[in-house]
Amino acid sequence: MAQEIELKFIVNHDAVNVLRNYLHTLGGEHHAPSQLLNIYYETPDNWLRRHHMGLRIRGENGCYEMTM
């Protein structure tokens, strides 16, 4: 799997196009949309959440990775 960097923005509705246009000026590669499978796990007593952690398995095109 390729390295992924995820950014989340909270913007005013009127600023969406301005932000989108700015991000396009930064360069990078365009990738066609793809289908990701995300499965999140937790213990019965919510141990992960209580310790500010999460366990996820993500799959794409038959390749899977687990992150903690």
Image (tube, grey):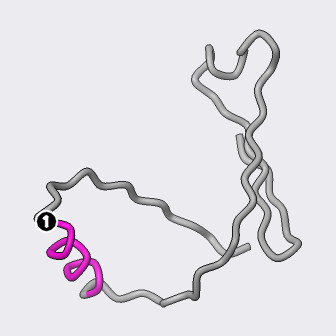
Residue 21 among magenta residues: yes
Amino acid found under the numbered disc labelled 1? Ala
Q: At x 56% / y 87%, what residue is drawn?
A: 31
**Residue at (77%, 46%) from the top-left corner?**
39
Tell whether 7 sits left or right of 16: right
- View extreme (top): residue: 45
Secondary structure of the residue carrying numbered label 1: helix
**Can you give x and y, in whole percent of width and height, for residue 18 in the image?**
14, 75
User: Residue 15: x percent and y percent?
Assistant: 13, 65
Q: Is disc 1 surrounded by few (<14), some (14 to 19) or many (20+) residues within 10 Å?
A: few
Would residue 33 appear left or right of 42 to someone viewing this image?
Answer: left
Q: Is residue 13 above or below residue 24?
A: above
Where does residue 43 sit, x and y in percent of width and height? 80, 20
Q: Horizontally, is 26 left or right of 58 in the view?
A: left
- Residue 48 percent across, percent down from the top left: 69, 22
Bounds of the magenta span?
Answer: 15-24
Q: Residue at x 77, y 9 (%)?
A: 45
Q: Quadrant of residue 55?
A: top right
Q: Which residue is mark 1?
A: 15
Q: Quadrant of the C terminus?
A: top right
Residue with the most extreme right position: 62
Q: What is the number of callouts on the image?
A: 1
**Is 18 left or right of 57, judged from the image as shown?**
left
Asked if 7 appears above or below 54 in the picture, the reply is below
Name, please, the residue furthest toward the front: 13
What kind of secondary structure does the magenta stretch mostly adopt? helix
In the rendered view of the protein, which quadrant contains the N terminus? bottom right
Q: Is residue 40 above or below residue 20?
A: above
